[in-house]
Image (cartoon, grey):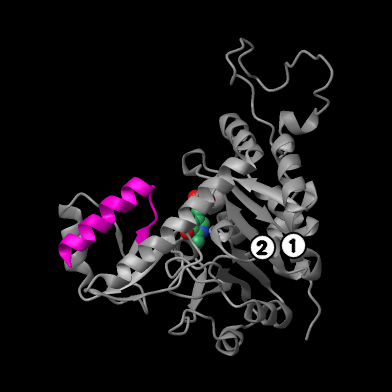
Amino acid sequence: MKKFNLESLVRPNVWAMSPYSSARDEFTDFDKEMIFLDANENPFENGVNRYPDPQQRKLKSLIAVQKKVTISQILLGNGSDEVLDLIFRAFCTPAKDNIISLPPTYGMYKVLCATNDIENREVLLSRDFQPDIAAILKEVNEQTKLIFFCSPNNPSGNLIDIEKIEKALRSFNGLVIIDEAYIDFANATSWVQRLSEFPNLIVTQTLSKAYGMAGIRLGLCFASQEIISILNKIKPPYNVNDLTQERAYNRVSDQIGINNEIISIIANREVLSKVLLEVNFVEEIIPSEANFLLARVDNATARYDQLIAKGIVVRNRSTQPLCENTLRFTVGTPEENKLLIHALKELS
Ligand SMILES: *Cc1c(COP(=O)(O)O)cnc(C)c1O
């Protein structure tokens, strides 16, 4: 196996560039009482008249302690969707490079391939939604820059086997991205804890799911300092706004509150899972480590419409490979779950 070489993976134009230096990057000694006439801001205070901290130092300091990483191993974005986009644009040369994704999975990888003119080499998961590493490695060529694992996987909800991801990390010289949008619901430790073992590992997380902050758009990226500094070169300087930084800081500080919600969601997922199995048109429930359940039903389109008629919107995932006749149920509040269960019983 060749040795991992980051420079060979970065787009040459990105490797060569220096980051845009904003006013807030050039002067950072905020402890002093200074008069800021450097960024063409409106000087009249209203709480948001100043540009936000481009490096989100306060928020990153808190996250670094919680995740047991250094600040230099963290990049924050406008949702993890922005983080994923930065990864594509830093490493994949349009009309030349390819990535590997593992359907059925999160739709953004495919969208980003199309946006960036990158070939998407799809290797289907198995019937039990696990990757076939031998088949994946067969698809790898000189132009393969990234492999995406989503664990827990959306829409199936299961964790990807640790040994399989390890095998990919050890056998593939490109970057392995593990999308952990749902990790806080899972009975598993995050791959963030293993960054020091794998120079080619990138882990993404988000405040949109377990942290209950989809509206503020905050995505997290953890990787080696070397990878993070490449992404920092191309990130828009003020990509995480002040209101987001502040709300995120307050929320991330409240681990007890977050954990209580997670415990409630997991308990309700288990209740919903049992009830769904008793519904006569439900054929199978995929065991879930996330905040949703994928159920195989007799006729997904018909059942979807029936639920809509009862005022409940679920997601029909039937067009995804291996997901024929499936509906995805997000776990709601206890009250919402009761209404869903009531509606399902009426239909069965
Ligand atoms: C919901 C979700 C995200 C979240 O993206 P944000 O842009 O942070 O809201 C990322 N990955 C997966 C697999 C998801 O399901």
The spot of residue 344 in percent (x, y) is: 22, 61
Main SS category, magenta section: helix
Q: Eyeballing the image, is 158 above or below 172?
A: above
Q: Which numbered dot is residue 172?
A: none
- Highlighted range, magenta: 329-348
Residue 19 higher or lower than 159, as above or below = above
Q: Position of residue 201 (x, y in %)?
A: 70, 67
In magenta segment, residue 59: no
Is any atom of residue 151 visible in this view? yes
* Vertical position of residue 141 compared to residue 66: above or below: below
The residue wearing badge 2 is: 190
Question: Given the image, on which type of amino acid does mark 1 rest?
Answer: Gln
Q: Residue 156, how many percent across, how many down?
A: 43, 70
Identify which residue is drawn at 62% across, 83% down.
141
Circle 2 — which element? loop
Side of 174 relative to 65 (left or right):
left
Q: Which residue occupies the foreground of this view, 18 or 49?
A: 49
Q: Residue at x 83, y 26 (%)?
A: 29
Q: Are marks 1 and 2 in contact (CB under 8 Å)?
A: yes
Query: 26 or 294, which is in the foreground?
Result: 294
User: How many residues crowd around disc 2 within 10 Å: few (fewer than 14), some, or many (20 or more)?
Assistant: some
* Vertical arrangement, residue 109 with respect to residue 262, above or below: below
Horizontal side, residue 186 vs residue 62: left or right: left
**On the image, which quarter does residue 284 sit in?**
bottom left
Residue 193 numbered tag: 1
On the rendered structure, is 227 left or right of 109?
right
Image quadrant containing the N terminus: bottom right
> Residue 296: x percent and y percent?
31, 74
Work out which quarter of the rendered image holds the C terminus and state it.
bottom left
In the picture, measured across the screen, residue 59 lies left or right of residue 95, that is right
